Image (cartoon, rainbow, N blue to C red):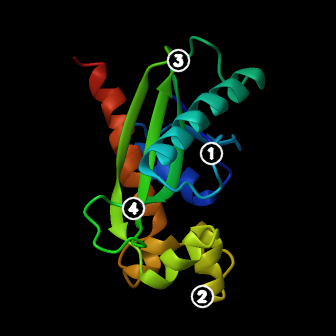
Amino acid sequence: MKFIVASSNPVKINAVKLAVAEHFPEAHVEGLEAPSGVRPQPLSDEETMRGATNRAKAVRQLALQRQLITPTQPSLCIGLEGGVFHPEFALDVQELWSTVWAVALDEKDHLFQSNGARFPLPAHIATLLHQGQEMGPALGELLGDADARKKYGMIGYLTGHFTNRTQEYASIASLAIGLWYGSKNQ
């Protein structure tokens, strides 16, 4: 079974490896850069979901072009997108929450979508994002670690490394892949 991840970011590739390890221990997981078609920092839940969907579709086309998969070969193309949104229940107009979407696209062009890891961002980070910065670089600047988003991410920082971005994305990827897996038994 092949899993093509729409990114070269080791967090996203390792997240998918972690998500499929139990059910597909021999899986081939590969990452390829694919465009999201949305802003570098998605600013709504819908935009974040659209970015994940666009990435899954784009990486499928790229994998087919490079002959990494065939049109009928069992495979999943995975788009993962992190973004922020302003919840309707927020009391502060500047409040932002993190959100992550995962989309699995199979060889029959069926989409399986999942969402999760929603949590509020500190006000000083939300301010930077409202000023046009991306979360990863803003976190990197704050911590003096330009690679923070490729390691522990915002969730690692906020939880004192209790969890990290790979685990965050793995749980959401696992759900999207699980929805595909479960659909085969229905």
Residue holding disc 3: 107
Give the mark nearest the N terminus, 3 or 1: 1
Residue 20 or 100: which is nearer the viewer?
100
Image spot of residue 87 (x, y percent): 33, 60
Residue at 68% x, 24% y is 61
Q: Quadrant of the C terminus?
A: top left
| Amino acid type shown at disc 4 | His
Query: Which circle's residue, 4 or 1, is located before the other in the chain?
Result: 1
Q: Are marks 3 and 4 in contact (CB under 8 Å)?
A: no
Residue shown at 60%/88% (left/top)? 143
Location of residue 64 (image quadrant)? top right
Dot 2 lies on which element? helix
Disc 3, disc 1: CB below 8 Å? no
Give the residue furthest to the left.
Answer: 186
Mark 4 Cα within 10 Å, few/some/many (few <14, many 20+)?
Answer: some
Local SS, label 3: loop
Q: Is mark 4 on a helix, strand or loop?
A: loop
Q: Which of marks 1 and 2 is nearer the N terminus?
A: 1
Cα gap from disc 1 to disc 2, whole angstroms = 26 Å
> Where does the image place residue 71, in percent across and percent down from the top left?
62, 13
Label 4, label 1: how many angstroms apart (C-alpha)?
17 Å
Query: Is residue 21 among what the camera can see?
Result: no
Image side of residue 100 versus residue 127, left or right: left
Residue at mark 2 = 143
Mark 3 or mark 4, earlier in chain: 4
Which amino acid is tagged 1? Val
The residue indicated by pointer 4 is 86
* Of 13 and 33, the residue lying toward us: 33
